[in-house]
Image (cartoon, coloured by chain):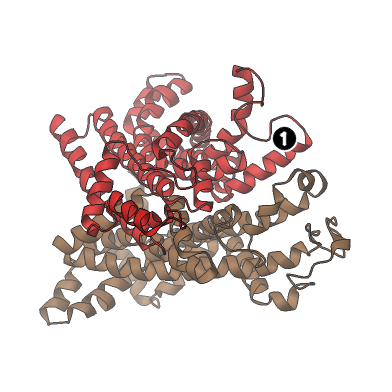
Amino acid sequence: MAAYIIRRTLMSIPILLGITILSFVIMKAAPGDPMTLMMDPKISQADREQFIEKYGLNDPQYVQYLKWLGNMVQGDFGTSIVRKGTPVSELIMARLPNTLLLMLVSTILALMISIPFGVLSAKRPYSKIDYGITFTSFIGLAIPNFWFGLILIMVLSVNLGWFPTGGVETLNTEFNIFDRIHHLILPAFVLATADMAGLTRYTRSNMLDVLNQDYIRTARAKGFKENRVLFKHGLRNALLPVITIFGLMIPSFIGGSVVVEQIFTWPGLGKLFVDSAFQRDYPVIMAMTVISAVLVVVGNLIADILYAIVDPRIEY
Amino acid sequence: MSELQTTPSPEIRLKENISKKPETMTKIFWEKFSKNKLAILGAVILFIIIMSAVFAPLIAPYPQEQQSLLDKYKAPGLEHLMGTDKFGRDIFSRILYGARVSLLVGFASVVGSILIGTVLGALAGYFRGIVDAVIMRVVDIVLSIPDIFLLITLVTIFKPGVDKLILIFCLTGWTTTARLVRGEFLSLRSREYVLAAKTIGTKTHKIIFSHILPNALGPIIVSATLKVGSVILAESALSYLGFGIQPPIASWGNMLQDAQNFTVMIQAWWYPLFPGLFILMTVLCFNFVGDGLRDALDPKNIK
């Protein structure tokens, strides 16, 4: 097991390096090297040369890349062009808690809703309930999340006034846990939509497979209550592969947060990314791209390792 | 047990079939596909949407950019089927023109990324070894960056426009196809007919493209269909955020850009509603057709 974990971890290192190389190449392909954008066009020739010297813009490309990579590994992502002098890492750390909170709550919401519905669907396949749930999840997979968010805001927030239209808390008030939850519900639900639909379908098909197994028939033959058979014997085994799927869902959560944070003016990483992209703030854009990719790689790594730990049938 | 007794053995069934006219693949496919009601419904609706997009100038009651400030925020009615927006433009007409952009980006991007993905995936799966390792690592790397980050970063560099957008979707979209095709090639490359072709000295490119590829087409077609839907979703999200198709050209995504506005939300519910409904319906139909194709093209799925 230890050997597998080490091997699997080592395997992700070339991918991480590849991500940084790709990001560097994209940054260099930008018209008007973003590095030169950081310079004030009015500065004198001498200052310009000093600047170029300072940031090593005359170095060969690979030296520049290695320097950039070296700084990044140490947590230094450079400074923002637009917000003069603010380190990118500071901007990111300020927004990170909001995004993590949103993703955590969405994840819990997705699991809490999709698993019971998936089981319900599999309990009586091809019944009316099953068709209803399947059709709803089809819609969940096809609905544009920004539009779903807009419609929810229009109906529930603006016209009915049940929810706030955006933000993390009511402005100019003290910290209030209920107020925070109130602000979280809509964005977390919208962020969870697509994955909720996917997970429901996934739980359903896994449950259907598991319910055909011999040990389920044995459990039923022993006279166990149906719910016990479903949840204790069935669901436990059906949920194993969900861990892997969860690893695959991380990119959609991170990607989804970009759109959802924009709709609900949620001050997190996604909104920072969109704002920076509008302002062509390349250091922030590149840092965010690399970080999002690293999160995906690490997420997949954790999912793979967890799966190996949880499923005793797999040998390494 | 009872199954064994009731179904005739393969030999008997084979004998029965010899006397009949052999069923063509197309016929088998069509029989299975036409039984799937949702897939048929999806195909019909898509056909209508595509036709209305193609003939938009003939169908649209108003030019897409015709503004009329007197008519702004008109509710849906006989004059304006789906109401008007803040410039008094007819939303129904703009949806028809927007369909042209959204569908064009969807189809063109998918054709491009399927071509790139198929060729690279075929090379990786057929030659294996170093070619495979290099191509697949690139796939891993591109797939690690969440789509929307890669798309927005590329858009900030290339400057948006329909052609650039298609190019960007091709650059990001080929990876999943490459993975899929590689998998197919890995299992097909050791089949007898490939061996036979090799033995008689068939050229390698011919083996790849005329012997193996036709047998891998099923899964490629299915994934292409599902991909059109996901590209349309991604394009609309990008355009909504302001990175995709730029106004005044209408696209389903950028029509929603102005809709996030409290005045609009209180006075003009139709404005955010209709463009989104069209995105939802189109993507839903592509998914239905894709699922139907998957069932119909799967050789394991015997009637």
- Identify the subunit bearing mark 1: A
Question: Is residue A159 or residue B111 the one in the foreground?
Answer: A159
Residue A46: x %, y % from top left = 34, 56
Question: Is residue B233 or residue A206 the one in the foreground?
Answer: B233
Question: Is residue B30 or residue A259 the one in the foreground?
Answer: A259
Q: How many numbered marks, from 0 up?
A: 1
Going by the image, does A289 lie left or right of B272?
left
The residue under the point 48% across, 42% down is A201
Going by the image, does B303 lie left or right of B44?
left
Question: Which residue position is annotated with label 1?
Answer: A157
Q: Which quadrant of the rendered structure holds the C terminus of chain B?
A: bottom left
Q: Check the image and report above or below for A283 versus A199.
A: below
Label 1: element kind = helix
Q: Please say whether residue B209 is visible from this viewpoint.
A: yes
The residue under the point 58% across, 43% down is A262
Q: Check the image and report above or below for B99 versus A105.
A: below
**Picture quarter containing residue A245?**
top left
Colour representing chain B: brown
**Picture quarter containing residue B245?**
bottom right
Question: Is residue A143 or residue B209 the one in the foreground?
Answer: A143
Residue A57: x %, y % from top left = 29, 56
Q: Please say whether residue A257 is visible from this viewpoint.
A: no
Going by the image, does A278 lie left or right of A69?
right
Note the chain letter of the red one.
Answer: A
Residue type indicated by callout 1: Ser
Residue B184: x %, y % from top left = 28, 62
Going by the image, does A1 lie left or right of B267?
left
Q: Residues within 10 Å of mark 1 (few under 14, many from 20)?
A: some
**Picture quarter containing residue B177?**
bottom left
Q: Which quadrant of the rendered structure holds the N terminus of chain B?
A: top left
Residue A27: x %, y % from top left = 36, 57
